Amino acid sequence: MAGTATLAASYPVPAAAQQILVMVQGDPITSFDVAQRIKLAQLTERRTLSQKQALDELIDERLKIFTAQRYGITADTEEVDKLFTNMASRSGRTPEQLTQALGQNGIDARILKNKMRADFVWNNYVRGRFSSATTVRDSDIFQALEDKGEDTVKAQRTTEYTIRQIVLVISRTDSDSTRGQRMAEANNLRKAFTDCESGIAAARQLRETVVREPVLRTSAEMSAPLRKLMDDTPIGQTTPPEITQVGVELVAICAKREIVGESAKKREVRNELQSKQFESLSRRLLDEARKAAMIQHR
């Protein structure tokens, strides 16, 4: 973690704003750090923190890094930079643009990177303790489903689809008119597609078209939007064509049937319960770290 002295040297602030408020395992937290955390929470999470809340979060941040390090879990500069780059990319920016945007709001990018480092190493530390410390039983899931008013019998059934992926290939150098022609071909194929046997045969007659082998997928494996799309597509027809990196893609639904298995709703509830257990374990481990740490308020 970048020390306060290094941070102050690269991001000048008045000496009064660097008053040390707390020492955590010998690592100082200043009033400048607190002010930065308040700005960061407001900008990136739309949260309004009091000074005490911001200070508590910074103490937790230091403890996360210190505790994870004790167990050999660290994140080097390259790893943190990768996390920062991914965040920038999700907002359609380069790392440099994100750094500039933070600076325009009076925030040093390293404040965000420190938080990323703490969250990254702590999550890895808690995951290492999670599997042995927690478990989600089916009885817990069924109780949660009942509490939500869900049918527990349906929760043990899932839909299995037999699908065939069809790709009308487009190269990166193809013109817009060529792409338009390929989309028109895909739409015509979809209109004529009434069953997989004849439809797949027709697809294979199209130029530069790839037909994948049959694949089995269950609804529990799919995102909610994709699950709805598959449910809404009748057997023997295809999903609407979509332009991807490799071309125009359609998915033919060749069969669908209900089988015994974990439904999407059951998996969703399982994930919710696991998430709650993870958060509870994280809080307990952090409380233990606080009790064992040397925290000196100034």
Image: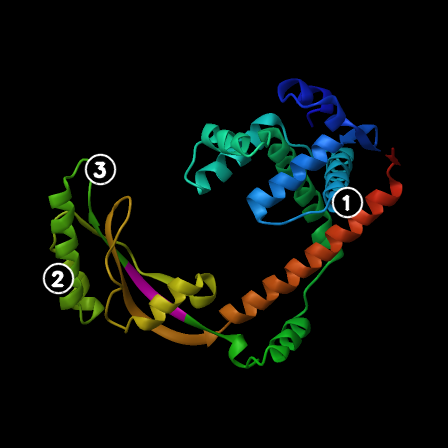
What amino acid does circle 1 point to? Lys
**Which image quadrant for residue 222?**
bottom left
Residue 172 is marked as 3
Q: Tell me the mark number nearer the camera, choosing from 1 and 2.
A: 1
Residue 271 placement (x, y as % from top left): 59, 62
* Helix, strand or loop for the magenta stretch, by majority: strand
What amino acid does circle 2 point to? Asn
Sequence-first tag of 2 and 3: 3
Residue 258 placement (x, y as % from top left): 42, 76
What amino acid does circle 3 point to? Arg
The residue where tag 1 is placed is 52
Q: Secondary structure at mark 2?
A: helix
In this rendering, is residue 179 above or below 141? above
Marks 1 and 3 sit apart, C-alpha to C-alpha, by 54 Å
Residue 138 is marked as none
Q: Residue at x 26, y 44 (%)?
A: 246
The residue where tag 2 is placed is 188
Q: Tell me the mark number nearer the camera, choosing from 1 and 3.
A: 1
The answer to whether one can see residue 59 in this image is: yes
Residue 194 placement (x, y as % from top left): 18, 71
In this rendering, is residue 147 above or below 200? below
Say whether residue 163 is magenta.
yes
Q: Secondary structure at mark 1?
A: helix
**Which image quadrant for residue 242?**
bottom left
Q: Which residues are magenta?
A: 160-164
